[in-house]
Image (cartoon, rainbow, N blue to C red):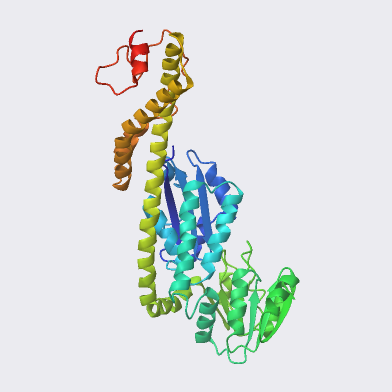
Amino acid sequence: MDLSVITGVSVSHDRATVDEIESARFADERTAVETLLTREGVDEAFALQTCNRAEAYVVTSDAAAGRRALSDFAPDVRDGAVVELDHEASLRHLMRVSAGLESLVIGEDQILGQLSTAIEEARAVGGIGPMLDDALGKAVHVGERARTETEINEGITSLGSAAVALADRGIDLDGATGLVIGAGEMGTLAARALDASAVDHVIVANRTVPHADHVVRDLVGEASAIGLDAVPTAVGEADVVFTATGAPNYAITPETLADAGETFVVDLAQPRDADPAIDDLAGVERRDIDDLKQITKETESNREAEAQAVERMIDEEFEHLLARFKRKRADEVISAMYEGAERTKTTEVDRAISKLESQGEFTDEQRETVEALADSLVGQLLAAPTKSLREAAGEDDWTTIQSAIQLFDPEFGADAPDLPSAPEPRGSMPEEIPEDADVPEFVREQFGDD
């Protein structure tokens, strides 16, 4: 029986620095989930790691176990930069993340794809069970609704386009050459944003040139693809450099830019691509995700009305999800209650029929009558508890739910031996049938004379 809860923890751009987010990350999302699943009491796990957030969620039998499992998630991050999320806060936060309300660029589209990819990574290693399946499925649904039913993603829609806006404030992009290092999702977004700007030429560099060439083929303006070994030469041509490799080592170092001259570098990677030491080079300006916050604040202001509409949507979907969880929990307890009652009913009906058969002729019609009587009794006796349990779940009365679990645990007594000398269980057929009992006459005649 599942009365589990979700516990989450988040380190993101709204409270943490780039360095703090980096320190909270696992090698990748799949590794994070695999690690979390080894923690005591963890039944399900999920991790989301992007340029501006590192988050983890676990499903456990109680919240205390969840907090213990996540206690060392971000040991090097200062107090106040780590947000702990209880069950309901986790559900709502995941919806906000998917809708783009928690993004550095409010309403950006990239997060929805990143969330879907993270879900598949967790599912591949057994991290997604019924609880997270419902929660994450609802989050994705909310994200899709937000983008189709509102204009939350109008205008600047990615870190790439925000980075271009930032670069445009630092240098004149008209007729400039832009270099994008990395041909992954972020690099692709950056290349497209540069292509849509006043930049004349876009160069895309990647470890595997065919991947860079694939990005270049989708661009409208003049563009070319190169390998990473050609970056030191390309930076000499570039006026603006965007880095987005996600590699463990720096892609841009002081040596890379030693002869580059005036260059505006925007580091979009997590972990960082650009060595902070390049700040000491004459003519080089470096910006990172933290510097994009001013751009995104302006975007947030422009989308305030749309964000409010999405908030209302989240409130609605949140209540639907909570109601679904409550119904499922109540139904699980009710199912256990009926399972226990069915087992007892079967035992007692078999015992009664054995006694009746030993007393003389006993027809199939009479057997059906006895079984129908037992079914009717179970249904009538459990009707009131069923109603009460559904009402208790709707009112968050988990004390009543837990009491019902203890009373109607389907595993209780399942393996007990059927010994003749054992006392008859409560609810067995009485030795004498009361005069006013509504039972078939043949049962009264045969069983009452025993």
The quarter of the picture where residue 249 lies is: bottom right
Q: Position of residue 232 (x, y in %)?
A: 70, 77
Q: Which residue is at 54% across, 69% downward? A: 110
The quarter of the picture where residue 164 lies is: bottom right
Q: Position of residue 141 (x, y in %)?
A: 48, 62
**Is 385 on the left-hand or right-hand side of 241?**
left
Q: Nearer the viewer, residue 450 or 424?
A: 450
Q: Nearer the viewer, residue 160 or 142?
A: 142
The correct choice, above or below, for 21 with respect to 194 in the image is: above
The correct choice, above or below, for 86 with respect to 402 in the image is: below
* Residue 213 in sight here: yes
List the single residue furthest toward the left.
Answer: 436
Q: Quadrant of the N terminus?
A: top left
**Is 164 on the left-hand or right-hand side of 409?**
right
* Residue 105 in sight here: no
The quarter of the picture where residue 26 lies is: bottom right
Q: Which residue is at 36% across, 30% downward? A: 376
Q: Nearer the viewer, residue 423 or 219?
A: 423
Q: Position of residue 318 (x, y in %)?
A: 38, 58
**Is 436 on the left-hand or right-hand side of 256?**
left
